Image: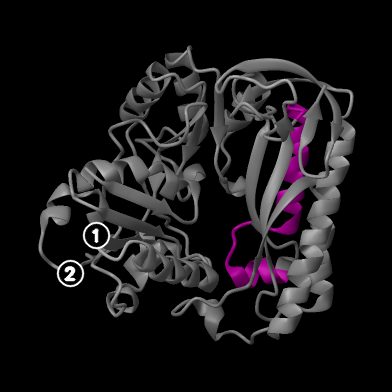
Amino acid sequence: MSVDVITFGCRLNAAEADAIRDAAGDLDDTLVINTCAVTAEAVAQARQAVRRLRRERPAANIVVTGCAAQTGAAEFAAMPEVTRVLGNAEKMNTRAWRGEARVAVSDVMAQTRIAAPAGGGAGPLPRAFVQIQNGCDHRCTFCIIPYGRGNSRSLAAGEVIAQMRRVVERGCPEVVLTGVDITGYDDAGLRLGGLVKLVLREVPELARLRLSSIDSVEADADLFDALANEPRLMPHLHLSLQAGDDMILKRMKRRHARADAIGFCGAVRRLRPDVAFSADIIAGFPTETEAMFARSLDLVDACELTQLHVFPFSARPGTPAARMPQVERAVVKDRARRLRERGAAAWRNRLDAEIGASRRVLAESAAIARTEQFIPVRLPAGGAPGAMLDVTIAAHDGKNLVAA
């Protein structure tokens, strides 16, 4: 058996890597490129990887799958380096892997179920990803992902618990619940907060539970309660904010206003004072003026964000935002740079504030651990992967904390 999966993009893609290997089975000398379509750059990176891998392994079968394959199958099928193209539904289907069609991409909007990984998620020993949801029912004007992933569907809570138990049995102390829109999770009325409480109650051996990116406007009362009262739910939230100006948020077709984002962060901080927030923000969305952009910059301080994932606006074919008046590329790149600089300053401030603190960390390797707030810590004395360590923060190097 020789199936290697090269993953681009989100944690959901990472979570699906094991399932892809299981579905592919015992194929010989096969490289699977699990693509991302969130930006044009992500698609270009996948194409570059295909060409590079063909040069490195000229005899290998190269299979392209994932969101970029789903939304741009013809583009990848036209590449002579590509052996097969499989859609997002087909990549989990053993029968599709055994089929003969060079391009097998079905209508993802017809999908009503999740093909959950039987193994309980992917990732190194200290951390596993468990998929609880797929797809999205919202149609943000910039986003192509619903067309790659389909409509929202949720994994039954009993199946989530079963996966969590398998994760714990194989020795993973930390799990990340992941999906496209996990705050849209709904299993017969059980929302994300209720699922979090259920997991922590039914899997008491689990040391740490994390959430992947959330949409704050969908947060339910149980999620707030869990943040306030469940110490095993880690105090780090990654928010899908995208912008800080109300008009831009409206043109993005987001469902929150600037005040909602600020109010959410304040409410969570009152319940869990040690919480850390990171966020996605888009620079240079169509029609964005300098004054509008300034409100995104200001959002970093207003929400007390400690880390930013900055995306220069990328027009995705077929989305409404691609037809809006575009901001000049030089301006987009400059605004992305300024956002990254603001994010870097916020990160340094957070690292400064950690010096002298006592932290319980989870070792990811012999050299690096993570605090509960997901801040990386260098371990001069070393540590066994998966071990929980109590350390004092002595310094930082601008990117990582350094333990004494």
Position of residue 282 measured from the top left corner of the image (x, y, whole percent): 66, 65
Residue pictured at 70% horizontal, 46% vertical: 278
For residue 262: magenta? yes
Please name the residue that numbered disc 2 is placed on. 102
Position of residue 260 measured from the top left corner of the image (x, y, whole percent): 71, 51
Residue pictured at 40% horizontal, 24% vertical: 167
User: What span is colored magenta in the figure?
Assistant: 247-274
Position of residue 60 measured from the top left corner of the image (x, y, whole percent): 26, 60
Does residue 380 lie above or below 145 as drawn?
above
> Nearest the camera: 99 or 327?
99
Instruction: Please identify the quadrant where the N terminus is shown.
Output: top left
Question: Which amino acid does the dot numbered 2 rest on?
Answer: Arg
Question: Which amino acid does the dot numbered 1 rest on?
Answer: Ala
Viewer-nearest of discs 1 and 2: 2
Q: Residue 161's image quarter?
A: top left
Residue 110 is tagged as: 1
Q: Residue 119's image quarter?
A: top left
